[in-house]
Image: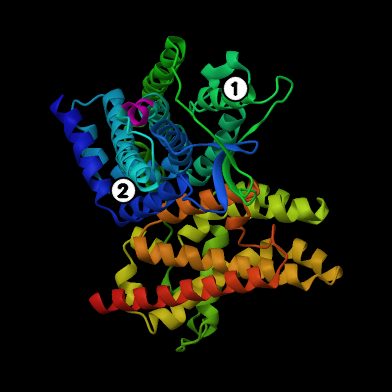
């Protein structure tokens, strides 16, 4: 039992002390603040037709609990995923493998650690929701139970299941982080589809929000005529708030069957870990790989067989073209080769799919498939402990960092060439410029977050959020012109890209001075 607690404690402290966690926590606070629109805001998060609730304890508590359940499930997987991989790379896993800790205890400890990390962020959001009540409320009394109950019943079971799911993906898809990211992307979308409006399917709702939204819809329908039916909209809805009508939401009395179903999701996650523990490699995968590699026989070549005169002459080269070529080759050769099949299918879709669909749906998904490549642009040196050599190279910012940035942009534009060509034929150069600037922005964001957090996790989390919101038509995160066709928006994205690059330059300059 002591080893089990030690695994949880050490893993939790290691994650919460990282730069990626602190930055994610700050982003979560900013997002949590937007869960409840301030008075006079031009957007809403939960809306039933023209109605939304008064800012009482029940409305703020339940809305923030629902948004936290979906939001943290969305980004939580990418935040906590990689715990086993970190133990393998740091050699801690090999040490744990020599102890009496069973596979299930180890995996369950990692799941608990994942859950505690997500629970820490949820606790911060919970405190933020209470502060928002006192900021926006003017005549309703404070009821702590209306805040605590939805978080206990809705948010916590969802986070626990996502925490176990992250461990499950790591065991079954070891060394395939790109596949894990892509599969969870589609799995998350499928879990949202399972939120059926039918009351007999509430037990399939992983996020636990459907019972609350159904109650909100029923409350509004009772206020209106019997034949009138309103539909609830969940998410960031811009505009259409001038004619907002308000109603009093008094919370939900969760039936016992629903509470049991929430517990069943947690138990289901534990059962998945129990089954997965039988397939856990117990840190033998890397050793087996090394054993296979060691069996390869090295052949020696006599120096007499080499014609030195035919070898190219060594010469100094301080240009950037050779570095750009190397960085680009590293990009396209990284990851599993079969993933290029998905890239080819995406490129073909850009060629033949309807223009609006190709721009708004296919392009962001195709670029998201490169998340592992772009996240490792400036972090691969630290991952392989070669950053001291690269930092000591000739002009590491003007040559190396700039070459990495250009290689990432080259890949983005190369993948989008079919779509760019279609717009050029139509003489729609505004969309062409939007795609090019969008590629520059997302690569510059990857470089900035990589330099800032010194890891891949933060960009992966944020890029997933941006891609998911773009696919769902939220124009606020449109960085590639799929939902905007205005020069003002293009200028805004261009300015953000320049600001991002300037910050990257100064942060890397400060980092080099400390080496």
Protein image colouring: rainbow
Rendering coords of residue 419 (x, y %): 76, 61
Query: Can see residue 145?
Result: yes
Q: Which residue is most to the left?
A: 2
**147 is within the stretch colored magenta:** yes
Q: Which residue is most to the front?
A: 139
Q: Which residue is most to the top?
A: 257
Main SS of residues in magenta = helix
Q: Which residue is mark 1?
A: 218
216, 274: nearer the viewer: 216
Q: In the structure shown, which secondary structural element does the residue marked by tag 1 occupy?
A: helix
Rendering coords of residue 205 (x, y %): 53, 24
Instruction: Measure the C-alpha gap from mark 1 to mark 2.
Output: 53 Å
- Splitting the image into 4 quarters, where does residue 79 fall? top left
Rendering coords of residue 402 (x, y %): 48, 77
Q: In the structure shown, which secondary structural element does the residue marked by tag 2 occupy?
A: helix
Say which label, 1 or 2, has the lower sequence index: 2
Give the residue drawn at x 64%, y 45%: 243
Rendering coords of residue 124 (x, y %): 31, 43
Q: Which disc is residue 89 wearing?
A: 2
Q: Residues within 10 Å of mark 2 (few under 14, many from 20)?
A: some
Query: Can see residue 369?
Result: no
**514 is within the stretch colored magenta:** no
Give the residue drawn at x 41%, y 73%: 504
- Splitting the image into 4 quarters, where does residue 426 fall? bottom right
| The N terminus: image quadrant | top left
- The residues colored magenta run 145-149
| The C terminus: image quadrant | bottom left
Give the residue drawn at x 31%, y 54%: 22
Task: Give the number of the mark in front: 1 or 2.
Answer: 1
Compared to residue 266, the image places residue 164 above or below, namely: below
């Amino acid at each position: 039992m002591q080893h089990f607690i030690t695994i949880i404690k050490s893993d939790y402290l290691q994650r919460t002390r990282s730069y990626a966690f602190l930055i994610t926590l700050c982003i979560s606070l900013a997002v949590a603040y937007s869960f409840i629109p301030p008075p006079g805001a031009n957007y809403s998060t939960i809306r039933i037709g023209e109605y939304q609730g008064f800012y009482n304890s029940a409305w703020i508590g339940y809305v923030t609990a629902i948004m936290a359940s979906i939001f943290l499930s969305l980004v939580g997987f990418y935040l906590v995923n990689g715990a086993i991989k970190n133990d393998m790379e740091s050699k801690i896993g090999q040490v744990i493998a020599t102890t009496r800790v069973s596979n299930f205890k180890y995996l369950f400890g990692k799941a608990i650690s994942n859950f505690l990390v997500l629970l820490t962020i949820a606790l911060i959001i919970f405190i933020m929701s209470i502060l928002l009540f006192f900021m926006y409320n003017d005549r309703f009394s404070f009821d702590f139970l209306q805040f605590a109950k939805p978080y206990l019943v809705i948010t916590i079971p969802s986070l626990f299941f996502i925490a176990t799911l992250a461990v499950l993906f790591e065991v079954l898809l070891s060394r395939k982080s790109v596949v894990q990211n892509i599969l969870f992307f589609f799995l998350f979308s499928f879990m949202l589809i399972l939120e059926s409006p039918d009351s007999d399917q509430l037990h399939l709702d992983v996020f636990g929000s459907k019972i609350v939204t159904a109650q909100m819809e029923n409350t509004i329908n009772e206020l209106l005529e019997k034949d009138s039916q309103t539909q609830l909209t969940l998410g960031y809805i811009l505009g259409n708030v001038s004619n907002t009508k308000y109603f009093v939401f008094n919370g939900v009395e969760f039936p016992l069957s629903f509470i049991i179903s929430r517990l069943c999701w947690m138990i289901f996650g534990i059962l998945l870990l129990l089954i997965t523990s039988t397939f856990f490699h117990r840190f033998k995968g890397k050793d087996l790989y090394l054993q296979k590699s060691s069996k390869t026989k090295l052949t020696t070549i006599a120096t007499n067989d080499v014609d030195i005169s035919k070898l190219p002459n060594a010469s100094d080269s301080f240009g950037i073209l050779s570095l750009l070529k190397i960085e680009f080759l590293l990009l396209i050769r990284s990851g599993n080769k079969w993933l290029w099949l998905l890239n080819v299918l995406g490129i073909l879709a850009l060629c033949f799919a309807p223009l609006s669909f190709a721009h708004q749906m296919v392009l962001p998904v195709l670029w998201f498939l490169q998340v592992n490549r772009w996240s490792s642009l400036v972090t691969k040196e630290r991952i392989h402990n070669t950053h001291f050599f690269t930092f000591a190279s000739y002009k590491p910012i003007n040559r190396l960092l700039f070459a990495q940035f250009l290689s990432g942009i080259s890949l983005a534009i190369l993948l989008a060439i079919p779509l760019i060509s279609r717009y050029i034929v139509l003489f729609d150069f505004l969309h062409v410029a939007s795609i090019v600037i969008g590629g520059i922005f997302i690569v510059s964001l990857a470089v900035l977050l990589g330099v800032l957090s010194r890891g891949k996790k933060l960009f992966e989390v944020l890029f997933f959020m941006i891609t998911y919101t773009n696919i769902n038509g939220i124009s606020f995160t449109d960085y590639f012109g799929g939902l905007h066709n205005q020069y003002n928006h293009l200028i805004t994205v261009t300015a953000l890209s320049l600001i991002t690059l300037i910050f990257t330059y100064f942060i890397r300059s400060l980092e080099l001075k400390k080496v």
